[in-house]
Amino acid sequence: MGQLLLNNVQKFYGDFEVLKGIQLEVKNGEFVVFVGPSGCGKSTLLRMIAGLDATTAGDIVIDGLRVNDLPPVKRGIAMVFQSYALYPHMSVFENIAFPLRVEKMEEAKLKAKVEHAARILHLDQRLQQRPGMLSGGQRQRVAIGRAIVREPKIFLFDEPLSNLDAALRADMRIELAKLHRQLKATMIYVTHDQIEAMTMADRIVVLNAGEIAQTGAPLELYHKPANIFVASFIGNPKMNFLPVTCTAVSDAGVEVAYEGQKALIPVTPRQGAVGKTLTLGVRPEHIQIGSGDIALTVAPTVIERLGAQTVAYASLDGEAENFCATLPGSAGVRPDQPLVAGINVADCHLFDDKGISFERHVELTDIDMNLLNPTAAA
Amino acid sequence: MGQLLLNNVQKFYGDFEVLKGIQLEVKNGEFVVFVGPSGCGKSTLLRMIAGLDATTAGDIVIDGLRVNDLPPVKRGIAMVFQSYALYPHMSVFENIAFPLRVEKMEEAKLKAKVEHAARILHLDQRLQQRPGMLSGGQRQRVAIGRAIVREPKIFLFDEPLSNLDAALRADMRIELAKLHRQLKATMIYVTHDQIEAMTMADRIVVLNAGEIAQTGAPLELYHKPANIFVASFIGNPKMNFLPVTCTAVSDAGVEVAYEGQKALIPVTPRQGAVGKTLTLGVRPEHIQIGSGDIALTVAPTVIERLGAQTVAYASLDGEAENFCATLPGSAGVRPDQPLVAGINVADCHLFDDKGISFERHVELTDIDMNLLNPTAAA
Amino acid sequence: MSVQRNAVIFAWILLLPAVLYVAAIVAYPLVDTFILSFTDASLKKTTNWVGWVNYSKIFNATFAEVILRTFIWTFFSVSIKMIIGVFGATMLNSAVPGRALFRVLTMPPWIVPMAIGIFMWGWMYNGQFGMISGMLQRFGLVDAPVAFLAQGSTAFWATIITDVWIGVPLVTLYMLAAMQAIPQDLYEAAWTDGAGRFYRFRRITLPLIVPSLITMSMLSLIATFNSFDIIWILTRGGPSGETTTMIIDTYRTAIGSNKYGEGAARAVLICIFLSIFCVCYFRLTSRLASGDKR
Amino acid sequence: ADQEISWIYCGDKIDPIHEKYIKEWEGKNPGWKVTPEVVGWEQCQDKATTLAAAGTPVGMAYVGSRTLKEFAQNDLIVPVPMTDEEKKSYYPNIVDTVTFENTQWGVPVAFSTKALYWNKDIFKQAGLDPETPPKTWAEEIAAAKQIKEKTGIAGYGLPAKTFDNTMHQFMHWVYTNNGKVIDGDKIVIDSPEVLAALQAYKDITPYSVEGATAYEQNEIRAIFLDGKVGMIQAGSGAAARLKDTKINWGVAPLPLGPSAKGEGTLLITDSLAVFKGTGVEDKAIEFAKFITSPGPQGEYELQGGAGLTPLRPSAKVDEFVKADPSWKPFIDGIAFGGPEPLFTDYKGFQNSMIEMVQSVVTGKAQPADAIKKAAGEIEAFK
Amino acid sequence: MKQPHLLINRYKWYEIIGIYAGILVFLTFVLAPFVEGFLVSLKPLSQLFSSPYRFIPENGSFEAYRTMWISVPGFARYIFNSFFISTVVTAVVLVLVIPASYAFARFEFRGAGLLLAAFLAVNMFSGAVLLIPLFRLMRSLGLLNTYFAIMVPGVAFLIPSAIWLLRTYMMRIPRELDEAAFVDGASQFYTLRRVILPIAMPGIMVVAITTFIGSYAQQFIFALTFNSKTEYAPLPVGLFAYFGRQEVVWNELMAASFVGIAPAMIVIFFLQRYLVSGLTAGAVKQ
Ligand SMILES: Nc1ncnc2c1ncn2[C@@H]1O[C@H](COP(=O)(O)OP(=O)(O)OP(=O)(O)O)[C@@H](O)[C@H]1O
Ligand SMILES: Nc1ncnc2c1ncn2[C@@H]1O[C@H](COP(=O)(O)OP(=O)(O)OP(=O)(O)O)[C@@H](O)[C@H]1O
Ligand SMILES: [Mg+2]
Ligand SMILES: [Mg+2]
């Protein structure tokens, strides 16, 4: 069992409010990812769940028991640190065996457990080496091994992959996902890398400045971000934003004008929007060359050719951010040669002046049958 | 001017041969990226060009002058270190001004230069701060600023982005590419991240264990890798490899058999291949669901949903590596539900038993008009 | 909350043995000294409370001289120690063959019993039979023996130099350690920008060892201020009291003349002076450290 | 069990003669043990004082007689009164060195006097008669001057380092001019006799070893042994050492000042002090008297080399002097010798005296001023 | 000569000369008194004081290195005592200082700064002044004239600087290591013993060496005052046995000093790498 309930959890450092009343329920066996920019309080929250940092107010409840005052070991959690926190003077075996040694487990049983964990993590060959001799990915796995042997109800990971290089990170992502399915334990994972969040989570919790900005399945956040913050944080390269003016509102959606072009965005309308300046969002991968419901003529300044796709960046007049388009394959764009970027209204997101999104007319279940019952897939 | 010629450059550490006779010419204004796995000798080569490490044998020629025995400052290079190597006790201004102070440049001129560089790098607001107060990306730019003010003929970068997080890395990539176009200087850039290599390089030099595995424009490496090493290194997720048997050879290509299915791969044939076991390579992004020239039935174990695309990983019998497919959008694949992966022969790569590729019948100029004269784009 | 409180209790459990030990052995004598400083304790069997008399007695004309001298002596000794220490560390930090041996060779002054080291210096300074005077005569730089401990001026510097000599190994070692902690890439970056060896030293090494330099000079200052054996063995504070520092004065009063009360008052005064130094030091370093955080 | 008399014994090891007599005494006094603790010369006195001050005195300690007054005034030691007979057995003035308030506070155990040594070769070189040593200060200064001027070698060895002995050396001059520093309870340093002595110091300094303030007596002696100085005043130990050198030397009574009544010298004695509060005081006194009784003491002090002068006249001493005439000046000086001045704060007094000497030797002050200053200072140390 | 790979470390000929000249000057300063002392130890006593100054002694011999054992028969014992006392002192200091430094390095509690300053203040009082009160204390503890008389105050005065050094070192050990052990249920003592102690080993070595030397060569005054028994006297006290009534047996004293510091020098020689690197780690301020 590994159920977690955060009930109005708050944290102050002196006068500085780091976490502003977090309310969250994590189901048993769920893989939840906390994501957000640096300094938003992810680590702090995780450390409070672990019992490393004190909670200023609110309850942390694990399996129905309020654990605020229990030490970590009594909470049934295990934590994997960003820096791995391996003991440099111990062999891999001893590192993994550490929690069991603390419990004074008998030698034979301990050995069996450590070796089992090592097999899961493909570390069998490395048991006698010191962490210093291992590669980053291997160290990572040792840290996970140390967590596994305790058979905790909840695993906590604090940016475990951020020290690895791109290729290794991709590999480790897959291994972690597999491990989750194998152990069927609850996992809470902190990262500021939205790709990790998207690929591993059953559910993502986006944190912004100590508050939950949105909670939902990865594709829910991708397709129906609740606000500009989530919209720009989820998706890579990030969503393009255009200032538009609302010209009309109807049941079919909201009509907006961008540089003279009018388009009807299929979103649930809201009163009093007409005449206001709204923000239109469109993801780079939804931009195609040639005409669309809205068309922009842009001259890309930088072209990135990845082979499988081509990413073009352009500066729009008066905008600080680049306008970006991801084009399939080796698209025939060249730097400084203007092209027409077409946008379909069906792909558009619309945000009001406070950054809150209008609900899009997209049926998530059409996109992925798992989406509305994410744990079923696990 | 910033022309660089490496003529049979070798490097030994004791008996250990780190670089095995590197032969390379870099044109003025070119952006060359050295890429390769960790430990292949990239940093060593860069440091030899910079004049930080001694050259065991061979010549390093810059603008026609053999510089082996010159100190760095006389070579007309500037280097940006992976660790930034900022002086923690100096302000940003002083950090950037350092090379000019060394030259004893007069104050007014110095100030103008530093401020110009700071403007290019958007550091104007930060000039009085210490590096310790800056974010990773800002530090990075200070390091670049220090290189810029010297107006070197050649810039050397050693994994400048590896300490940054994903989003920042993407931003910095673009900024560097812009900078290259702005300064029109020769740049040599070391990384082990193939995405950086692909997106920024005019030309990529793939190093493997101290040797050049292949040199070419990014898309040339992507579409026509010279061997298995390059093929697997370039592209993300990496290319899938299948063992096939060569059954026949004709002018149209090489016919291979995979689990009973025969397919004619359009590559330039070679004598004596028939009957041998070859390796068929296909990139994840070229796999489609449903039938193709070759069809595999696989059950994905891990699905990564990125929103814009979906990546499915499956284990093939008897293969250690995952078989991977990148599918567009939110493809309807579910873990452990078998599906048929189709491969078109036109997308296939073929490698002989030594790992050398057969030349594909692909006209690169069809893909990108810049390709065969890459500097023209810069 | 309870987690926090446990940690504090645990910290005290860890500290307790050391604190109790030092308190038991040192605190009592310290307090005793403090109390003594308000009495007329001497060889007499009875002691009387005299209040501030001992302190008021200290402040006379010669004391001002002694204080001033102590400060000058300490200032020069500590500064020269630091300069030589940094110089030595710089030399020993160069990548030249034999440096491991050279490093070991810096340590003897630290290892040898202090008195013995000072006797050796006594020999060196001896005008008739000593090495320095002998060498100077041999090379014809002087024609008569030079007795370095004879004049106040030379004796003053002679005692400083000996004090420097005893302190230098630790300073050198510490500064060497500080230099080795500077990342090599800073030097490489500066070199690629054309900075020469001296320029690199001045603009990188020196500023970056400042925190360590301050720590060391602080510890060195306390030791130097209380440096007793050197002056005592070489000159006994002479000639004409020109090498008498506060600690010599204290020793003379307390042990020589058995005026324990007056001696204690001087000791307390020394502690007060040093405490003021320390507070300034903490202020200074915390400011420097906050400015230097990476 | 045995009762113990602890004894702080200055030096590097116990003299075999003392060892022998300790055994003998222990044999005669069953149930008693003497346990000497050997402490280096530099620290032995301080250690005895520290132990006494801390309230755990030793049974007996070897101390300079000059400290007896301070110990006695602070009730740390017990008196060791001498019978008239005992007093008489010593050379004149010796008993005075341990006497304070008309009683004796220690048993003299070591005694030293000084005489003038001269280097005959240097005298010859300077055109002086090598066989006639100077008899007066005036002659001494003139000889020193002649040596310095004729040969370039220093004429006289004047120790003036900040050391005990610097005052001792000066006191020799004071006592060879019938001077006194303190008379009863009165400071009389500001007298013409003392002034003359200090003036003589000033006069002889230019012809002395360069840098007088850097040397103490052993160093000056070493210079003499090296043949680099014409005259020094030193104890009997120098004679023993001179015998091992090639130097042609002579020893004579200390030259006399203008007001001298006869040969004089400073009489320095070390004593055995018996500390109060050990419970073995009486037995310690008994032992102290035994170990310094004519038999053991005579054997001990006449070994030579240690620089000791005999405490008591005896046939043996006469015999000894006859065999080695160089001893004569040391004994002759006793007659008009004087004790170390007794001050409550002896160290304080000594520091003032050293200061006075140094200020004159280094030319910082005129003798008259220096004496005036010292007179004022030492008033406080009585 | 093999050229270094790092070109920055490749010196021009004049730089090499400059560096060696610098080292020469520096080492001359550091070692000249030892040369003088060594020459003294070689000279026969009668030639000690002779001018003009001669660098190479006439009739020089190693005789003093033989006779020193005879004139002070207990000398070997003094060396042993020094070793024994220093070893025990070092051990006790480590036992007390390791937990204390850990507490200072890791825990934030009220008064920590004050306590640390108080430890430093101990060094501000010179031993000479504290001698008599200390003596009384030793007496009431009944420790006079035992090995403990030397060890007990020695430990107390070596603790402050040891804490100071080790604390800076321990501050560099990542806090995550403690936290990881905490999460795994390890008690705080278990963490200290199994995690911190082994990792802090280089720093502990440095403290051990400095403490050992501090105790080996420098603790003179306590040994002298609190102990009267020759059989317990340490090296510095033993060396003063070469001081006679009239003069010092200089050649034997110097010979004995060289013999006496040799064991410590040998220890240092083998540990110097450790010493520098350990200090390095400790030197960096957080
Ligand atoms: N001990 C502390 N005292 C005061 N403020 C703190 C402390 N620890 C963290 N903070 C502040 O709390 C906020 C949240 O910190 P936290 O480490 O949880 O961020 P994060 O989301 O994990 O960021 P990152 O992605 O950079 O790890 C930050 O603004 C930080 O400055
Ligand atoms: N000073 C040295 N002595 C001995 N071997 C060295 C030294 N420096 C580097 N090497 C070896 O040379 C090889 C190449 O090192 P280099 O640092 O150039 O690799 P790299 O390609 O930059 O790797 P990375 O991507 O990890 O930075 C490595 O195998 C390394 O172990
Ligand atoms: Mg964090
Ligand atoms: Mg590298």
Image: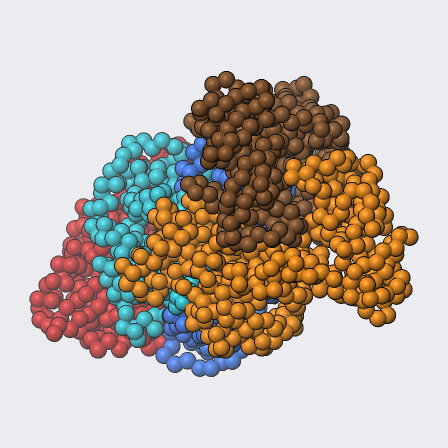
Chain colours: A orange, B brown, C blue, D red, E cyan
Please provide percent x and percent y for residue A368. Answer: 62, 57
* Residue under the point 55% across and 77% down: A59
Q: Is residue C58 visible?
A: no
Quarter that holds the C terminus of chain B = top right
Q: Out of C58 and B76, give the one closest to the viewer.
A: B76
* Residue under the point 58% across and 76% down: A7
* Residue under the point 65% across and 67% down: A212
Q: Out of B252 and A329, give the one closest to the viewer.
A: B252
* Residue under the point 26% across and 66% down: E145
Please provide percent x and percent y for residue B177. Answer: 72, 38
C256 vs E245: above or below = below
**Left or right of A246, for residue B297:** left
A10 vs A38: above or below = below
Q: Out of C31 and B86, give the one closest to the viewer.
A: B86
Quarter that holds the N terminus of chain B = top right
Please provide percent x and percent y for residue D13. Answer: 22, 55
Count of numbered circles in the view: 0
Please provide percent x and percent y for residue A14. Answer: 62, 72
Q: Is residue A223 visible?
A: yes
**Residue situated furthest right in the rendering:** A260
